Image (cartoon, grey):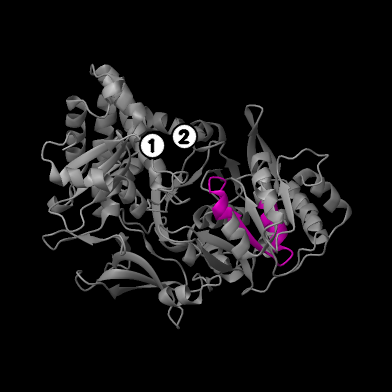
Amino acid sequence: MAKEFKNLVEILEHSVSTYKSSPLFGTKTGGAYKWMTYGEFGVQVEQFRGALADMGVQKGDTVAVIANNRVEWAVGAYATYSLGGRYCPMYEAQLVKDWTYILRDSGAKVVLVANQMIYDQVKPLLDELDTLERVIYCDGPRDSEDSFQTLLDHGAKNPAEVVYPQEDDICGFIYTSGTTGDPKGVLLSHSNIMSNVNGVHQLLEIGPDDVSLSFLPWAHSFGQVVELHCLLSMGAALGIAENVNTIIENLAEVRPTLLFAVPRIFNRIYNGVQQKMEAAGGIKQLLFTRGMANSEELRAVRERGESGGLTAMMNKFYDKLVFSKVRERFGGRLKYAFSGGAALSPEVARFIDNLNIMVYEGYGLTETSPIATCNYPDNRKIGSVGRPIPGVSVTVADVEGYPSGTGEICVKGPNVMKGYHNLPEQTAKVLDEDGTFHTGDLGRVDEDGYVWILGRVKEQYKLENGKYVVPGPIEEQLKLSPYVNQVMVEGTNKAYNVALIVVDLENLGTWADNNGVSRDELLTHPKVKELYRKEIERVSSTLKGYERPKRFALIEEEFSAENDMLTPKLSVKRRVVLARYGELLNSLYNDEKTAAA
């Protein structure tokens, strides 16, 4: 029977005791991964708990963190939980004004930051914010009173008793940076998080022999709950990626058995493998193509309930000869891959699946702690986001313009947040009196209970012919082109959709070199325009006619949190992008001779 936890402190004590000598966190230092055990982690949590208590942190107080994934992040979290406190994470990439707003709104007493640069930006806030009393930095020298290591030494000499929280006590804030307005602080309780952790224990067999590469930000609910809290509760190990640009390299070093990722990572794998096979050519490409076709045939056979016979035998042949070599790039041990955060293209899911890496897609929001539904072994439909996890129910509310049965996804269960901090009116807009949460996502539930997501309600718009368009899935499909880095589709009250495409400079540059195009003409050369016309036609073949962009514009400027065109969790701020590029997009309708048409 699966273990049932009541709070995060119970997880800590159980895992430190049960898996004391097992590796927990791997950090790359000096060119190799070095591992901290569960027991060593437990000691640091005890020490930092003592330091926080000596600073006056007590039950109900908020400790904040501004750092990417690292051991100190997790130590700070569990030390805070074991004092009955609330942990409030932020991203290093956020602007100072966002940190200031969140520190003020959460009433943070202490903030742990990654490095000297952030420390120097945040320390002046001690004079500006009434509640903030201390700024600590992870990379500080041992002789600094504000360094993490100094405080561990201090805490070792000043131990503090564990405070065991109640199930309904708030364990943290996670601020959702929406595409408009100030971020909202989602209040999550220990019971909210436990509903997800305990649900995962019932659905997946994960244990001390499993390893994951950690690169999803713990400042976001998906990375924090599914990767950090769930895996820690199961005795698994987490190798922390150096950064987003070293993921493939780190996969080969950590050799994970599990991978938690967002569609963008799977798209990179999809494009990277295809490009590598095309470059190899000859017999390698032929075997790969035939192996993929055989895998597709085997899937169809098994969906009919048949064993596969010769097709299954050939799959083993292609796996040994081709697919196992591809998997070696990711460490060679990957059994499961889990996708969340946005819709995963069914084409990409099938492709990864064909490599004999099972992909399971899930769905949820910060407000649902985050998992509401998921696919899992022996219960999967590619393209869906699975069934509700244990204890959770999903219903569909009617939305204008959509047939009965398709509408706004609503979630009810122990995973639903307590509300938005200090925002009762905003809370009332999404949370019914009976605890039902209105997600703002369009979708449907099929006859087998599987949920299918179509996009965001607030992002939908109507073409002049009356057809409703949800741009998110269209954009994900366009990003299957290796020449598309980012994209935004628009067409409100227009005759057709257009696309603003941020080009992939690396892949487009290589293509240009091979096709006699100067890099000075990457956005304007007729050959480039023809390339993108063909790419859009290729990757949008599964879309409805009115969904496909008829014209496009090419730009180099990436959407980012720094230029305020992306939220920290990488959602496009459409209003900001339109304010900057609206005139360019309108020109696609106004000028039939526009270069990007």
Which amino acid, by three-letter code, is at mark 2? Phe
**Residue 485 higher or lower than 129, as above or below:** above
Does the stretch in magenta take in 146? no
Does the stretch in magenta take in 82? yes
Which quarter of the picture shows residue 309?
Answer: top left
Going by the picture, which residue comes out furthest to the right?
Answer: 157
Q: Is residue 52 found left or right of 324 in the rendered image?
A: right
**Residue that carries the numbered disc 2 in the rendered image:** 330
Which quarter of the picture shows residue 430?
Answer: bottom left
Q: Is residue 302 found left or right of 428 in the rendered image?
A: left
Which amino acid, by three-letter code, is at mark 1? Ile
* Location of the C terminus (image quadrant): top left
Tell me the number on the disc at residue 269: 1
Q: Are marks 1 and 2 in contact (CB under 8 Å)?
A: yes
Q: Is residue 210 visible?
A: yes
The span picked out in magenta is 74-99
* Mark 1 secondary-structure assignment: helix
Residue 197: x percent and y percent? Answer: 55, 62
- Front label number (1 vs 2): 1
- Mark closest to the chain's N terminus, 1 or 2: 1
The residue lying at 59 percent from left, 65 percent from top is: 105
For mark 1, does the 10 Å Cα neighbourhood hold few (<14), some (14 to 19), or many (20 or more) residues? some
* Mark 2 secondary-structure assignment: loop
Residue 71: x percent and y percent? Answer: 67, 45
CA gap between label 1 and label 2 equals 10 Å
